[in-house]
Amino acid sequence: MSRVTAFNASGASRGFPTATDTSAEGDDVPDGYEQFVADRLDRLLRYATAMTCDRYLAQDIVQEVLLRAQRRWHRIGALDAPYLYVKRMVTNEYLSWWRRRAAREVTSSHSALAEVSPPVDDPAVRHAERDAMRARIAVLPRKQRAALVLRYYEDSTDAEIAAILGCGEGTVRSHISRALKTLRANQNTNTSSAAEVLR
């Protein structure tokens, strides 16, 4: 998979499949696909970055998912909520990436989540707290981290998270509860701190 790092003037990432991309299978782009990418690419990248804590990995994941989605767009585009389906594909790709590299330690980047967070004029102490929180979130088990990002970054309900993760709502609540318990146990972190970092 090629790494995507360059961005054009409009903010869209070069290397993502578009109507002018002839490297994908066939030369025809399905109806509605180009508009979907234009409307949703930035949000998918922010979501993937929040989950991976690595913007380059996030770009790789989103690029791979969009290439697969383009080939299946006649089916995906006919769904009631194509974005939710593609977001689930992104989540599954992230979880699969973790399974394929279970023995590999992922280095957390303190700046990764900061780039997708709204600018806030925080004092130095507050910045240090946020950096420490990001580092703790980055080492949570993958499904717990995904559940937290979906809840606090995407504002998803238990039912929506369950559909994306492919589990029951009770399991979703368990993932979130365990993640927050771990975060609270580490330097008395509270729930609101985790929510602020992910927003």
Image: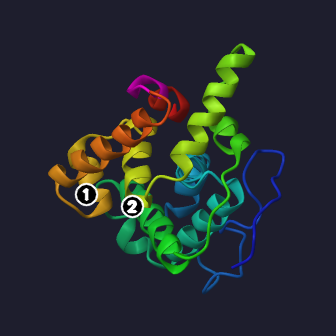
Assign a secondary structure to mark 1. helix
Horizontal and vertical percent position of residue 17: 65, 69
Residue 3 located left or right of residue 65: right
Residue at the bottom extreme of this rendering: 26
Per the image, the residue denoted by label 1 is 163
Classify the position of the N terminus by image quarter: bottom right
Residue 23's image quarter? bottom right
Q: Is residue 190 magenta?
A: yes
Residue drawn at 72 percent across, 51 percent down? 12
Identified at 70% across, 42% down, the residue is 110
Report crowding for label 2: few under 14, some 14 to 19, many 20 or more residues within 10 A (C-alpha).
Answer: some
- Sequence-first tag of 1 and 2: 2
Mark 1–mark 2 Cα distance, whole angstroms, equals 8 Å
Residue 7, relative to residue 91: is it above or below?
above
- Magenta region: 189-193
Name the amino acid type tagged 1.
Ala
Please determine whether, in this image, residue 51 is positioned above or below residue 132: below
Q: Secondary structure at mark 2?
A: helix
x, y percent for residue 78: 33, 64
Whole-percent x and y of residue 169?
17, 50
Determine which of the numbered discs, if any, sits on residue 111 in the image.
none
Report the label total. 2
What residue did someone put label 2 on?
A: 88
At 40% from the left and 33% from the top, the residue drawn is 184
Residue 43: image quadrant is top right
- Asked if residue 187 is among those painted magenta in the image, a careful observer would answer no
Quick check: can you spot residue 123?
yes
